Image (cartoon, grey):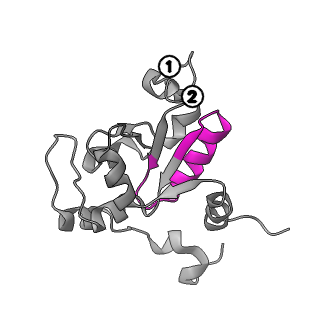
Amino acid sequence: MERETYKTLVARLASEVEELFPWDLEQELAGPKPPLLLDIRCPDEFAQVHIPGSLNVPRGILEMAVDYGYEETVPELVQARQRRVVVICRSGYRSILAARALQQMGFRQVLSLRTGLRGWNDSEQGLTDVQGGELDPDRVEMIFLPLVTPEQMGREAGLDS
């Protein structure tokens, strides 16, 4: 049996997770009952750029953050099981994995932001940094450029894996 890759895992789980596009999220945020925005990127990524009002709970502690009794517990998130929650990451892949985990832990209205913050930025929606300053979309695009080394490319770069 061939092993599953990150991309095949995300593609398989995407069919189990509802996604919404940035323009749909923009409408929901302007509505009477906006969703909880859950940014699951690492704290340093979040500090650089995020959607204003987002809650940052890194993917690595997510399962503990949504249950009581842990140092990582985030009460606002524990109490959001019946609330509409939109999970956010840079490109919309990690958010699918996180949304699926939340579904398994009892969240009933969890969605993933399709295209992630890259798509949000492409549609010229507001993004901020940790100081609360609004960011220029061109600057954000530079922040989101992938920095993959040849060693990280493996076979794609002609290296053995």
Report the residue at 25% width, 43% height from top.
52
Q: Mark 1 points at which residue?
A: 71
Magenta residue span: 87-110
Asked if labels 2 and 1 touch by Cβ distance under 8 angstroms, the answer is yes
Q: What type is the residue that disc 2 sits on?
A: Met
Under mark 1, the amino acid is Glu
Quarter containing the N terminus? bottom right
Which residue is painted at 33% across and 68% down in the image?
145
- Image position, residue 6 (x, y; %): 62, 62
Q: Residue 90 carries which label?
A: none
Closest to the observer, 157 or 76: 76
Q: Is residue 132 above or below residue 143?
A: above
**Residue 82 drawn at (x, y percent):** 54, 31
Q: How far apart are marks 1 and 2 (CA)?
A: 8 Å
Which residue is denoted by mark 2 in the rendering? Answer: 64
Residue lying farthest to the front in this orientation: 32
Q: Earlier in the sequence, mark 1 or mark 2?
A: 2
